[in-house]
Amino acid sequence: MVDQNDSFIREVNEELRSDQVRNAWKRYSRWIIGVAVVIVLGTAGHRLWTHWDSTQASDAGDKFLAALTLADQGKRDEAEAALQALEQEGYGAYGVLARFRGASVLAEKGDPAGAIASFKTIGDDASIPDAVRNTAKIRAAWLLVDTGTYQDVSALVESMATPTNAMRHAAREALGLAAYKAGDMVRAREWFEQISEDAETPRNVANRAQMLLDNIKASGKAP
């Protein structure tokens, strides 16, 4: 008798659960289906986006490497054209990389003024990460060591020649060389001493600074 009662109770409970499920489905089926559709579409969309993003990046990367190959082969006009196209159409970071390499190609072609202008444009572009902008300013400053004045170099990189700036070594060397070229040995000595006294200065930069300091001291032009 007990078994029959238990069996009856189980059947009633199962029926109740079945009714509850049917009622819940009638009430919430639209929402359940809607959520399921959103999940399916979201998953499909994510996969499509990932595929598209990967394809675009791969295509831009191939074009960038092709342009670099042209530059390495001495085909600078063709490399410049390829890089300019990539500047306009490049996906992700490749547009910026193309601008940077394009400026370098101008310098290699013997157009320092064009290269300096291009690097300055990159350095002034607020949409580009600071590290890239600062590197562009350093490149422009190094070209200006040969073609510009100390003031030109200073305007670009002196703000980076501070003790905590990661670009300080290159900035100080550019400033020191610009001063040395201008015949301002006192200022040149100050920059080269900052390089030599900085324990984090790369060895090759420190060695060049020390060599120029020795020349300045031997000349007697900087007390």
Image (cartoon, helix red, strand yellow):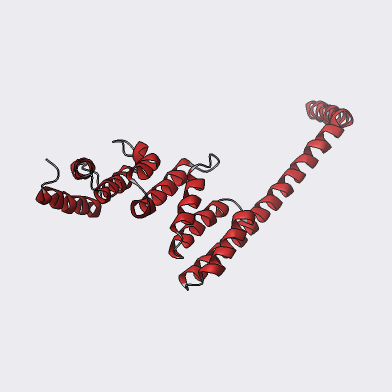
Residue found 21% across the figure and 54% down from its top = 208
Residue 174 image position (x, y, % from top left): 31, 48
- Residue at image point 46% right, 70% down: 72
Q: Quadrant of the N terminus?
A: top right
Q: How many numbered marks are there?
A: 0
Residue 7 percent location from the top left of the image: 81, 30
- Against 207, is 166 above or below? above
Instruction: List x then y, in percent, for residue 169.
Output: 29, 45
Q: Is residue 73 above or below residue 8?
A: below
Res 52 quadrant in image: bottom right
Give the quadrant of the C terminus: top left
The residue that appears at 47% across and 72% down in the rendered structure is 74
Decide which of 13, 201 is in the foreground and name it: 201
- Frontmost residue, 90 versus 61: 90
Describe residue 91's horizontal placement relative to residue 134 as left or right.
right
Q: Is residue 18 above or below residue 108?
A: above
Along the line of sight, the residue nearer the viewer: 124 or 49: 124
The percent coordinates of residue 92 (x first, y second) are: 59, 51
